[in-house]
Image (spheres, grey):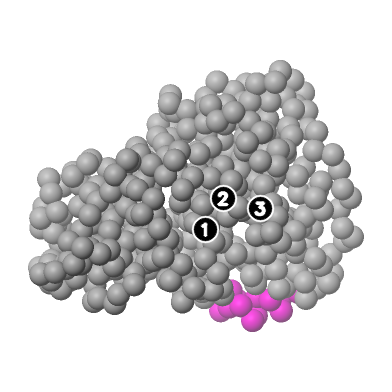
Amino acid sequence: MTREPYTNRAMNAPQSAKPGLWIARLSRALRRWLPGRPPASSLRIRSAMHELTARTIPSLDRIPAEAWDACANPPDLSPEDAAGERYNPFVSHAFLSALERSRSVGARTGWTPAHLLVEEAGRLVACAPAYVKTHSMGEYVFDHSWAQAYENAGGRYYPKVQIAAPFTPVTGRRLLVAPDAPAGARATLIAALRGLRDAVEASSVHVTFANLRDAEALGAAGFARRTGEQFHFLNEGYADFEAFLAALSSRKRKTIRRERRDALGDDIAIDLLTGSDITSTHWDTFFAFYMDTGARKWGRPYLTRAFFDEIGRTMADKVLLVMARRDGRHIAGAINFLGKDAIYGRNWGAIEERPFLHFEVCYYQAIDYAITHGFARVEAGAQGEHKLARGYRPVATYSAHDFADAGFARAVRDYLVREREAVDEQIADYEAGLPFKKAE
């Protein structure tokens, strides 16, 4: 529900991690170690343990949805593999192909699909949503400083390889390995990440918003691990919204009640729409909200109008639109995606200003829906410390990064040690200041 700024946040990082000093230090390191560009190579990788081969495809239309989804969202994921989300809509064939068919991603956008497939005798056993990128927009894990330092030292940072759900700061599986995949499938997929990097002469591979298990596997394979933070509502088995409020301090409880009252007043109603209830007219209205907010706040919105038609056609039952209506006309709305365990708030917009309406539409309605329908949590997007005062809690997020240049990798790894320490301290500070009642 938050916009993505185009610059890094210093966020209480140690002095050595401040952008100016960091760029100068890394630039000096790169001048010592920067080699020539890695040679291009074929992306045919074989595993000696099994007859596993890796290849890329330029579009998800090249592979059946059921084959991809058997790796991305298998119905029999173990609790360890599921990591708190048994179905993640953002790695599904429907979501990723909607981005492609609507031209929200593609060469002209700087997100060129190059999805990785690992196969055994022609059967897909592992895959990853992969893109060759010519910029660092739409990722929410900021590497602008790295790019600047790399190029200041004489290197070429772009293209780079991105393993991600585009425009979606949501944690999930990134190494999509089928439960019945043979031994070596995960290792072959990780090798293929580097193979793709070399094949397109990219500087680096970035796996963003990976779950902890994937981050650990990538770290064991030599990737540099990075930690960030988000704010999630965790459903502690509340009977209703009032039971959630009862868990908060008296002052915060009163504040939220006042915000909800002021947001709606006597003239605004909320419509919750999902599945066949969402019509083309609703998409037209929401897209107008999305474009207005995007154009005013961060320049060029990423998603095309056709994207919303695609998801309306293929996954409307995984969408929840929260729309605010006044005098028979919708004036604001938020789009949420539904997993099995979580609600994911993604984009919001409004054509009328109203105090606290953003909090009501994006946060309080999502909490209420999660409690009513038994979802374990609400993930309301990147950033937003103001969410803490509204019952959201800090959680760690993870990414993994690998560079063709060994010197650059050493410099980044050194920086990330300091950054992780700063993030851990910040999360601890957030925890100490949560608005929940203190235990006796």
Task: Mark yes or no: residue 282 visible.
Answer: yes
Q: Is mark 1 on a helix, strand or loop?
A: loop
Examine the rendered structure and indicate whether residue 177 appears above or below residue 21: above
Mark 1 or mark 3: name the one nearer the start of the chain: 3
Determine crowd level at label 3: few under 14, some 14-19, many 20+ residues with C-alpha closer than 10 A.
some
Say whether residue 34 is left or right of residue 430. right
Dot label at residue 102:
2
The secondary structure type at the circle numbered 2 is loop
In whole angstroms, how far apart are the C-alphas of marks 1 and 3?
A: 12 Å
The residue at 51%/52% (across/down) is 306
Question: Are circles 2 and 3 on residues that touch, CB within 8 Å?
Answer: no
Q: Give the range drawn in magenta.
A: 14-29
**Residue sitting nearer the eye, 77 or 307:** 307
Q: Nearer the viewer, residue 269 or 131?
A: 269
The secondary element bearing badge 3 is classed as loop
Residue identifier under label 1:
303
Q: In the figure, is residue 38 to the left or right of 55?
A: right
The picture quadrant where one finds residue 372 is top left
Is 393 a magenta residue? Answer: no
User: Gap between marks 2 and 1, in whole Å?
Assistant: 8 Å
| Callout 2 amino acid | Ser
Which residue is pictured at 44% across the width and 40% down the height?
313
Residue identifier under label 3? 106
Question: Most extreme residue toward the top, as rendered?
Answer: 121
Residue 62 locus on image (x, y percent): 66, 33
